[in-house]
Amino acid sequence: MVQFAPGVKVYLALKPVDMRRGFDGLAADVAQVLHNDPYSGSAFVFRSKRGDYVKILTWDGSGLCLFAKRLEKGKFVWPPIVEGALQLTAAQLALLIEGIDWRRTVAPEAPQRPVFL
C-alpha cells in the first residue's frame, strides 16, 4: 500500500490519460497540462478512461516513482472530466485508492474541552 505524509500536496488530473504512458509521458503531462513541476515532491494522480485504473507519479528526492492500481470491481470516484487538476489531501488520496467516495468523507469536529471553574 502506498502512503503519503499528511503534508504532501496531491493533485488529481481531471482528464483521463493513456495508461500506456510511463514516467516521462506522465511527467510531461504534469508540466504541460497541469502546469506544475513533476520534481516538486507532490503526488500527481491520473486515471484511465474506464475509471478502474490509476497511476500516481511522485518524486522522492532521488528519482521519479510510479505507482499503479486497478480495481477488480467498480470504478474510482472522480470529479467531472474537465481541464486542469484538483488538489486533495493525503487522507483523501488514501480513500480514493481504496475505492471509497472521498468526496463524502468529512473530518469530525474537534471535541470541546471541558471548562473547569
Image: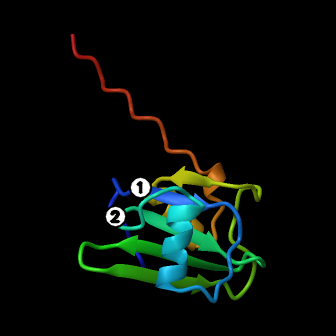
Residue lying at 57% horizontally and 84% vertically, measured from the top left: 69
User: x, y percentage for residue 108?
Assistant: 49, 41
- Give the position of the C terminus as an image quadrant: top left
Q: How many marks?
A: 2
Identify the image quadrant of residue 114: top left
User: x, y percentage for residue 43?
Assistant: 44, 65
Say left or right for 81 vs 4: right
Local crowd size for mark 2, using a 10 Å CA cut-off: few (<14), some (14–19), many (≥20): some
**In the rendered structure, which disc, 2 or 1, sits on the residue that comes first in sequence?**
1
Q: Which residue is mark 1?
A: 9
Choose mark 2 or mark 1, whichever is in front: 2
Which residue reaches farthest top? 117
Is 115 drawn above or below residue 75 in the view shown?
above
Which residue reaches farthest left? 117
Is 109 drawn above or below residue 84 in the view shown?
above
Q: Name the foreground residue: 64 vs 2.
A: 64
Residue lying at 37% horizontally and 27% vertically, measured from the top left: 112
The numbered disc on residue 41 is 2
Q: Secondary structure at mark 1?
A: loop
User: x, y percentage for residue 105?
Assistant: 59, 51
**Colouring used for the render:** rainbow
Which amino acid is tagged 1? Lys
How far apart are labels 2 and 1 at the CA level?
A: 8 Å
Identify the image quadrant of residue 55: bottom right
User: x, y percentage for residue 75?
Assistant: 73, 75
Q: Secondary structure at mark 2?
A: loop
Local crowd size for mark 1, using a 10 Å CA cut-off: few (<14), some (14–19), many (≥20): some
Q: Name the foreground residue: 28 vs 98.
A: 28
Residue lying at 32% horizontally and 62% vertically, measured from the top left: 5
Asked whether disc 2 touches disc 1, contact meaning CB atoms under 8 Å apart, the reply is: yes
Is 26 drawn above or below residue 44 in the view shown?
below
Which amino acid is tagged 2? Gly
